[in-house]
Image (cartoon, rainbow, N blue to C red):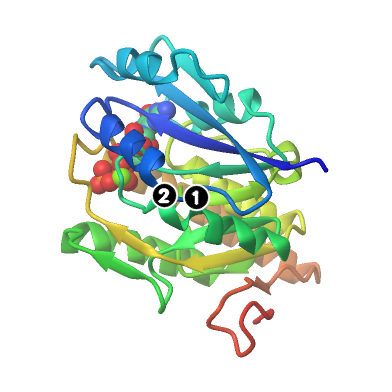
Amino acid sequence: MTRTLVSLVVPCCDEEEALPRLWERFQTSAQLVPEGCELEYIFVDDGSGDATWRILSELADGRTDCILVRHESRRGIGAGLRSAFEASHGDIIAVLDADGTYDPACLPELIRYLDEADLVTGSPYHPEGRVLNVPAWRLFLSKTLSRLYRAVSPVKVWTYTSLFRAYRREVLEKVAWTSDGFLSNTEILIGAARSGFRVAEFPTNLSVRRYGQSKLRTLSVIREHLGFLGRELKTGISHRQFGFRTEGGAISPASEERRGWHR
Ligand SMILES: Nc1nc2c(ncn2[C@@H]2O[C@H](COP(=O)(O)OP(=O)(O)OP(=O)(O)O)[C@@H](O)[C@H]2O)c(=O)[nH]1
Ligand SMILES: [Mg+2]
């Protein structure tokens, strides 16, 4: 019987403090993929200036299930994801932050949502999700962005910015995105919904980063998102003018029947 291959992508930029702890959690978690699946790890180091590459090389040494990708200089998380997806072989591709802000032990449950969806996003802002110790100003900015996306985008979810996701391979082969930065993640979600792929939400916990520094440059990320929101608004208006119907919901346990469509 052939087993489904899951590629677990971990984007890394200056994560020398977080990576050994993440790897330890990978090794001590009972399961990282659902029963019957195989796992390959893909780490993408985006021009880190610290010991990230050395640590990755050590942990991947002699393992056939670890693929390392390296950008000589920093090109951004969107570019990092693109390189990682190209290097992957899985029918399913999951993404997890390196900094331990999402629990790797939730991966099997996240991936199981793909039984009924093409893309599932971790969703701490879902009413059944939780946010632990994240500074109030960061939370406010991030939730406000998600509210704005909820108002203008063709798919209604609670969290548009989480990297913690799983995709069916076809989604990443079909959906194009332009940003090399953090906006890429939101572009993929909205692009997938617009292309007719089924989107699901997995309520989960987001904790504050405990090791290393944030890479998010708040002002430039907000500027990128506002530009995209403006374009989305225009697209939505022109679709309504010409009678296209793109409004859709996501599969979510908050719906009446767990995992039923809600609109
Ligand atoms: N490949 C690549 N990875 C990046 C880049 N920027 C951030 N990352 C990784 O993407 C993940 C999320 O980045 P974070 O800096 O944690 O951003 P955040 O989660 O929005 O913010 P904090 O958790 O508060 O730091 C981490 O695994 C980072 O190492 C980048 O430019 N290239
Ligand atoms: Mg983080």
Residue furthest to the bottom: 256
Q: Give the x, y percent position of residue 215.
A: 28, 35
Q: Secondary structure at mark 1?
A: loop
Whether residue 240 can be seen here = yes
Q: Where 171 falls versus 181 (above or below)?
A: below
Q: Looking at the image, which is closer to me, 135 or 147? A: 135
Whether residue 220 can be seen here = no
Q: Classify the position of the N terminus by image quarter.
A: top right
Cα distance in 3D space between marks 1 and 2 = 9 Å
| Left or right: residue 40 compared with residue 78 | right
Question: Which residue: 18% across, 45% down?
Answer: 210
Q: Where 70 falls versus 206 (above or below)?
A: above
Q: Where 95 falls versus 130 (above or below)?
A: above
Disc 1 versus disc 2: nearer the observer: 1
Of the numbered discs in the image, which one, if any, rests on residue 104?
2
Q: Give the x, y percent position of residue 224.
A: 42, 43
Question: Which residue: 64% across, 77% down?
Answer: 259
- Image quadrant where residue 83 sits: top right
- Image quadrant where residue 24 sits: top left
The three-letter code of the residue at mark 1 reads Gln
| Left or right: residue 243 compared with residue 117 | right
Binning the other alpha carbons within 10 Å of mark 1 as few (below 14), some (14 to 19) or many (20 upward) gives some
| Left or right: residue 104 compared with residue 178 | left
How many badges with numbers are in the image?
Answer: 2
Q: Give the x, y percent position of residue 251.
A: 63, 72
Residue corresponding to mark 1: 31
Question: Which residue: 34% across, 65% down?
Answer: 143
The three-letter code of the residue at mark 2 reads Pro
Q: Secondary structure at mark 2?
A: helix
Tell me which label, 1 or 2, sits earlier in the chain.
1
